[in-house]
Image: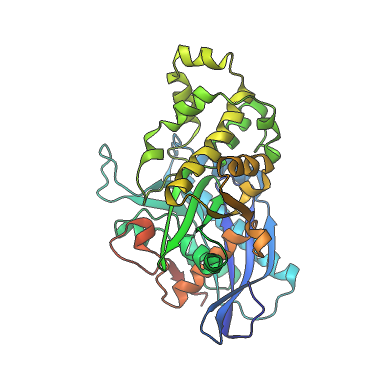
Amino acid sequence: MSSTQVNNTEFYLGIMTGTSLDGVDIALVEIGVDQDSKPVIELHHSRAFHLPESLTEQLAELSQVDFEPTSLFQIKALEQAYTLAIADCVNAFVRQIRWSQPIKAIGCHGLTVCHHPKPEPESDLEQGFSWQILDGSLLAAKTQLDVVYDFRSKDVALGGEGAPLVPPFHQTLFQYLDEQHQGQTICLNLGGIANISFWRDQLCYGFDTGPANTLMDSWIQLYQQQPYDADGQWAAQGQVCGALLAHLLKDEYFSLPFPKSTGKEYFNLSWLKQKIANFSDTSKQTCGNIKAVDVQATLLHLTAKSIAMAVEKLSDKGVLVCCGGGVRNSQLMSVVADYLPNYEVKTSTELGVSSDDIEAMAFAWLGYCRVHGIPAGKATVTNAHTDSVLGAWVTAQ
């Protein structure tokens, strides 16, 4: 972010609902260029809103791998309810901050209910897809603002993974660090899934390393009826089972070359239960009597170790800039740092960009890129056939 004198600035709203459904993050971002034609991105306001509890429960059910809808109307009704809730949040946000200047557009990710960028052999699909529910036209009508949404479909149609979307934004924000540090600058986003961004010779790269919070959230929901493990306190009470950790890390995803992406369609409670069920009796004896809290501790180390494995393949030293909800888990942050002793582990907040707001800011920037025809979809990140302009743009009028 910067207070540099800028030209041709516009204001955008960025909206993100994470896979944990813990809230709706909204950021008002000013985007433009300075006198040297360098991008300037400035956060003016941000807020987090809660979705209605009944809607959250229904959306959580919809995004389960084994969800079987009773009708198409059920899915459409949920999409409408979610969109109207987002519209209420936007209108409340604008009122609360008493904003009077024109807002060029909303960049809204929507809620991912299914991410299958490659067609599966047993399906009838000839083309992969990534599905985020959001009625862009309805949101535009209810907010009287242009809306940019459906950011992943174009990249998938071009043969890409459709994910991660944020590496070019991370590069825009943090590439200046390359001049200040010897070694690789890598940005780590800790959402439901962990993804990293990095750049070499001005080219941007990025991929999903594996689970961040999604498995830990699912496990504590099952055994403690809590939505997430606040600050990793439950995990800190458990003992890491090294043999189970090694068993989980043998999953083929962790050894796949990038570009690659994943989601809770793959890393979910069913995946974890199957892995534990396949865990040999000998290995179980190695760890003793594994308790639920020990599994939670092991899952935290799975997140940290899989991140470290990916990072160390890129560079043996550097600076790791961390953002996303997982940054608030001090136990996780500490273990990540332990696994990467040659890296300076920082939060984006320490560098002047709020770790809580950076994803919402990214979608404001992606909205800006769509409006201005800037190709934010990078083939080097997703393995698409070509770079592309992402998002569907719906006008308010």
**In terms of depth relative to the viewer, which is nearer, 315 or 118?**
315
**In terms of depth relative to the viewer, which is nearer, 134 or 358?**
358
Q: Is 166 placed above or below 215 here? A: below
Q: Is 70 placed above or below 382 here? A: above
Residue 185's spot in the image, x, y percent? 52, 59
Residue 113's spot in the image, x, y percent? 47, 46
Q: Residue 47 falls in which quadrant of the image?
A: bottom right
What residue is at 50 percent from the left and 22 percent from the top?
A: 243
Residue 196's spot in the image, x, y percent? 49, 53
Q: Is 288 placed above or below 206 here? A: above
Image quadrant holding the N terminus, namely bottom right
**In terms of depth relative to the viewer, which is nearer, 282 or 81?**
282
Q: Is residue 173 left or right of residue 277?
A: right
Q: Residue 212 falls in which quadrant of the image?
A: top right
Q: Is 7 placed above or below 301 here? A: below
Q: Is residue 185 left or right of residue 52?
A: left
- The answer to whether residue 315 shows anywhere in this view is yes
What residue is at 56 percent from the left and 62 percent from the top?
A: 181
Image label count: 0
- The answer to whether residue 88 shows anywhere in this view is no
